[in-house]
Structure formats: structure tokens, C-alpha cells
Image (tube, coloured by chain):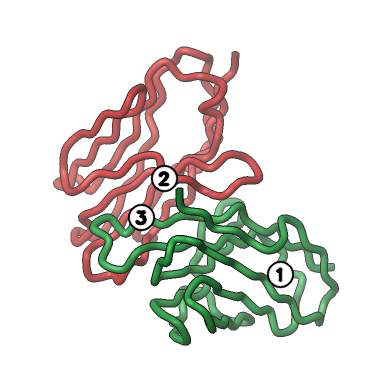
Amino acid sequence: DVKVTQSSRYLVKRTGEKVFLECVQDMDHENMFWYRQDPGLGLRLIYFSYDVKMKEKGDIPEGYSVSREKKERFSLILESASTNQTSMYLCASSVVQSRTDTQYFGPGTRLTVL
Amino acid sequence: QKEVEQDPGPLSVPEGAIVSLNCTYSNSAFQYFMWYRQYSRKGPELLMYTYSSGNKEDGRFTAQVDKSSKYISLFIRDSQPSDSATYLCAMSHYNQGGKLIFGQGTELSVKP
């Protein structure tokens, strides 16, 4: 079974703090993704990565950065957290050249910025 | 206009009802169509996928794709309270490099 884990289920931070969200997958997948999920807006892609040290902007990268130093780990960084970044953050991974591009998700981190 | 549109609901049905969940899309290049199920406070999990047009059945679930109308559906027969979740459609085409385009999700509640 594919396993994608995220470092925290719930996180509370203050405005202006630097926030790190960690994601680890154990299936040697090349692709990794970070989404945020908000009511009425669905899943929105923040950043994704095809390989170690590679990253591509998604649809809403502003205010975020990412790091992929190892194949199994993909980190999302909020440089200076703001209240409008309060959301559910989901990490996913998939295999390159998978016929279906099926993504496997972690359990999510619910971040609250006060 | 969003590439993928999905009625967000919420949808409430009695136990045993047939449920129909739908998505429309605008990009005719989409070839792979998926349905994810997301229970409260959990990440989405893949429920079914289909390639191109046609039907696919898995137990009480049937996924249907009509590429000519750019319309996909998920049918749930004999719905159970355990089916209560948010259902997200997702789609992709071969040249998107693994990216999926998701609908907004439909929240389903099946009442005993």
C-alpha cells in the first residue's frame, strides 16, 4: 500500500511566523504535489515537483515555497504566515508516466493562522 | 469558466437510494477520469478511474464517461451511511505531466 504521511494533523501558528509542512511518501514516487483545500473552492495546486531539487509553480504559489532535497520528502514553507493561509493542506504523490496519473494523498494538515 | 465543474451540494439521500454525482468539463483533451472519496478530516482516496468514454462498474459503484458531451457521472446503488463523504471528480490528459484537475467536490450524506 502506498503511504503518504504528513508531519502534523493540526497546526496553529501566529501571523508572520515561518511555517514548515512536511510530507513523506514511501513508494519511490517521482511526482509530489502540495494542495490547499477550502470550502467551495475544492483542491488548488500550490506547487509540484517531478524530481529531487525540481519544483514547478501550481495555480496559487504566492506566499509559499517548497523544498525537495530527497526523493521521498517534499516540504511546503509559508515564509510569513497570514490569516488567509488558514486552510487544509494536502500532499500527494504519483508515479511518472503512470497511465492514469493517479495521485495518492496524505491525511492532510489543518493549519490555523491567528 | 473553470475547466471542471461539479455541483458542491450538499446532497442528502435516504439509505438505499441511488445517488448520481456529476461533473462537466471543457477541455476535450482529457482522457483519464477519476473519482476520489474523501471522508471528514481525511485525505482523498481513489475510488474509481476510467479511460476515455464508457462505463466501469465496481460493486455498488458505476463510473460513466460521455466524452461527446464532456460529462462524467458516478452512480452509487443501494447507498449506505458509510458512503457519506465528499466525492471529487478529477481528470487529466497524457501531456499534463501528472497533474490532475479536480472538481470542487460534492458533499454526500446518506441518512439511515
Q: Colour of chain A?
A: green
Amino acid type, residue under disc 2 in the picture: Leu
Dot 2 crowding, Cα within 10 Å, few <14, some 14–19, many 20+: some
Whole-angstrom CA distance, mark 2 to mark 3, is 8 Å
Please state if B67 lies on the left or on the right of A114 as rendered.
Answer: left
The secondary element bearing badge 1 is classed as: helix
Which chain is disc 3 placed on?
A: A
> Quick one: quadrant of the C terminus of chain B?
top right
Marks 3 and 1 on same chain: yes
| Residue A49 visible in this rendered orientation of the protein | yes
- Foreground disc of the pair 3, 1: 3
Q: Earlier in the sequence, mark 3 or mark 1?
A: 1
CA–CA distance in space, label 2 to label 1:
29 Å
Q: Nearer the viewer, residue B66 or A94?
A: A94
Which amino acid is tagged 1? Asn
Residue drawn at x 58%, y 63% is: A36
In contact (CB < 8 Å): disc 2 and disc 3: yes
The residue carrying pointer 3 sits among few (fewer than 14), some (14 to 19) or many (20 or more) residues within 10 Å by Cα, namely: many
Name the amino acid, label 3.
Thr
Residue B103 point in image, percent of width and height: 42, 52
What chain does mark 2 sit on?
A: B
Q: Write the residue at 23% across / 33% down.
A: B56
Give the residue pinned by disc 3: A102
List the residue tagged with mark 2.
B46
Q: Which mark is residue B12?
A: none
In the image, residue B54 lies at what x, y percent? 16, 38
Label 1: which residue? A84
Which chain does red denote in the image? B
> Seen in the image, is A93 located left or right of residue B82?
left
Q: Is residue A10 above or below residue A49?
A: above
